[in-house]
């Protein structure tokens, strides 16, 4: 029986199968895309490859080489407005069949998981669904499902790119090592250029050296590390989202999307928590007239969002990822089968996945922005979208130049 996640919006996406061994493939369906959007499969596969990269990844990345297969909704490279069906093969699925064939009552099997890992969904999921073999929890809770989210987020990015909206995710910290301020506040395109050859998708080469050394020490000691990534979105128009209803506030939707990534424990927008340490006179972005006699802002401490609505400034988001809960040097636990103290289960896992998380973060951000974009500019075809978008931007320019009689 397939689990489904349906996102109620102009475009929605469904996961039909996910988890490391719950099926031979990940399948996603996107509904509501306008006809005529050009789909670049090479770009999507590139993003899937980036998700599998990053220094500190585990052994599964050597097995899976994710490639997208489009099953419906595209003809001659463009969307037809029919549901877009995507598939990513689980190549490691065959290797797990013997493991998954173990029955819960077989307490003697080494393949049965009964010692929950601290920090993982193992015990919480086991209590919720009364699973005796925690493998039923850990497989579904696996971050493997984020491969499909990267695929659908990449398609959202293609839609946004058509309107000159560009996003980039990059690592700003691993553990207690952070990049310098001079390597922050960059445009999305600059971030992509600086991170192109980076092992950690980082813009600061000096800081990255220290990060790599820290990861190497964690590998030797059997430990794991977390970090922080930042997402920057340029070219985003004002007016996406809404202040009218709480569940339409774009900041809440973006925060929820980022927090849904496995391992994410905190999200910031703009100044984030630092805004609470200062006074209003210092942190709010004051208005002024620019050279074109148009209202602009003195800064972007709000991170591109005010009142749950985009304000035309670059969108800036950050997310903090905890260390991976699977440690090679296992933490103390309790064996639920015997009631005795025992070390936690050890599964094949990453040491540090913050680089991969930044790719997933970029994807889910693009997805939420695309949803909001199509709510603001509905249309069955790309031509209709373009007209609606251009008409609105003309109105905004007139409004900011005080040339409207309202």
Image (cartoon, rainbow, N blue to C red):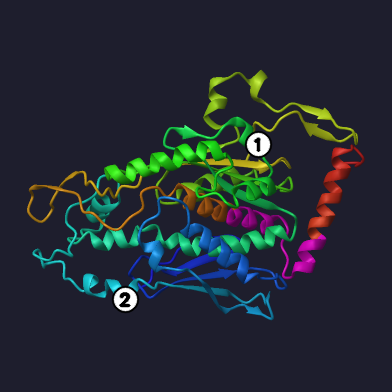
- Give left or right: position of 72 versus 90: right
Q: Earlier in the sequence, mark 2 or mark 1?
A: 2
Q: Position of residue 362 (x, y in %)?
A: 57, 52
Q: Local crowd at mark 1 within 10 Å, few (<14), some, or many (≥20)? A: few
Q: Is residue 373 magenta?
A: yes
Prevailing secondary structure class for the magenta stretch in the rendered image: helix
One can see residue 261 in this view: yes
Q: Position of residue 123 (x, y in %)?
A: 23, 51
Q: Local crowd at mark 2 within 10 Å, few (<14), some, or many (≥20)? A: few
The N terminus sits in image quarter: bottom left
Q: Is residue 189 magenta?
A: no
- Give left or right: position of 168 versus 377: left
Comparing 245 with 191, the one in front is 191
Q: Which residues are magenta?
A: 366-387
The image quarter in which residue 183 lies: top right
Mark 1 — residue? 185
Comparing 373 with 323, the one in front is 323
Give the residue at x 48% y 49%.
Answer: 355
Q: Position of residue 266 (x, y in %)?
A: 45, 39
- Give left or right: position of 356 versus 214: right
Q: Secondary structure at mark 2?
A: helix
Separation of residues labelled 2 and 1 (CA atoms): 45 Å
Comparing 135 with 249, the one in front is 135
Give the residue at x 79% y 62%.
Answer: 386
Mark 2 — residue? 94
Q: Secondary structure at mark 1?
A: loop
Comparing 166 with 191, the one in front is 191
On screen, 177 above or below 192?
above
């Amino acid at each position: 029986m397939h689990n489904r996640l349906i996102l109620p919006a102009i475009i929605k996406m469904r996961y039909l199968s996910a988890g490391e061994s719950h099926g031979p493939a990940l399948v996603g369906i996107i509904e509501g895309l306008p006809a005529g959007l050009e789909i670049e499969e090479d770009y999507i596969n590139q993003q899937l490859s980036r998700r599998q990269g990053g220094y500190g990844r585990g052994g599964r990345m050597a097995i899976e080489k994710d490639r997208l297969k489009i099953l419906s909704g595209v003809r001659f490279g463009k969307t037809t407005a029919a549901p877009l069906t995507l598939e990513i093969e689980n190549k490691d699925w065959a290797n797990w069949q013997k493991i998954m064939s173990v029955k819960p009552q077989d307490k003697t099997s080494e393949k049965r998981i009964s010692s929950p890992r601290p920090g993982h969904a193992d015990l919480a999921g086991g209590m919720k669904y009364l699973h005796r073999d925690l493998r039923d929890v850990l497989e579904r809770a696996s971050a493997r499902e984020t491969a499909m989210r990267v695929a659908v987020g990449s398609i959202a990015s293609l839609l946004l790119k058509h309107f000159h909206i560009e996003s980039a995710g990059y690592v700003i910290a691993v553990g207690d090592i952070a990049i310098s301020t001079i390597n922050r506040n960059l445009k999305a395109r600059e971030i992509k250029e600086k991170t192109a050859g980076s092992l950690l998708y980082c813009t600061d080469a000096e800081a990255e050296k220290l990060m790599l050394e820290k990861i190497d020490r964690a590998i030797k000691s059997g430990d794991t590390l977390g970090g922080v990534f930042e997402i920057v979105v340029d070219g985003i128009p004002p007016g996406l989202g809404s202040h009218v209803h709480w569940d339409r506030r774009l900041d809440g939707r973006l925060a929820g999307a980022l927090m849904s990534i496995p391992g994410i424990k905190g999200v910031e927008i703009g100044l984030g928590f630092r805004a609470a340490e200062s006074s209003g006179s210092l942190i709010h972005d004051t208005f002024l007239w620019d050279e074109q006699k148009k209202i602009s802002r003195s800064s972007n401490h709000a991170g591109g969002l005010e009142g749950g609505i985009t304000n035309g400034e670059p969108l800036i988001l950050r997310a903090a990822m905890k260390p991976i809960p699977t440690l090679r040097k296992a933490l103390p636990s309790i064996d639920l089968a015997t009631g005795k103290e025992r070390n936690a289960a050890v599964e094949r896992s990453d040491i540090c996945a913050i680089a991969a998380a930044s790719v997933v973060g970029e994807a889910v951000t693009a997805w939420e922005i695309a949803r909001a974009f199509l709510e603001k500019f509905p249309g069955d075809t790309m031509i209709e979208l373009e007209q609606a978008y251009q008409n609105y931007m003309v109105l905004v320019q007139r409004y900011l130049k005080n040339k409207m009689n309202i």
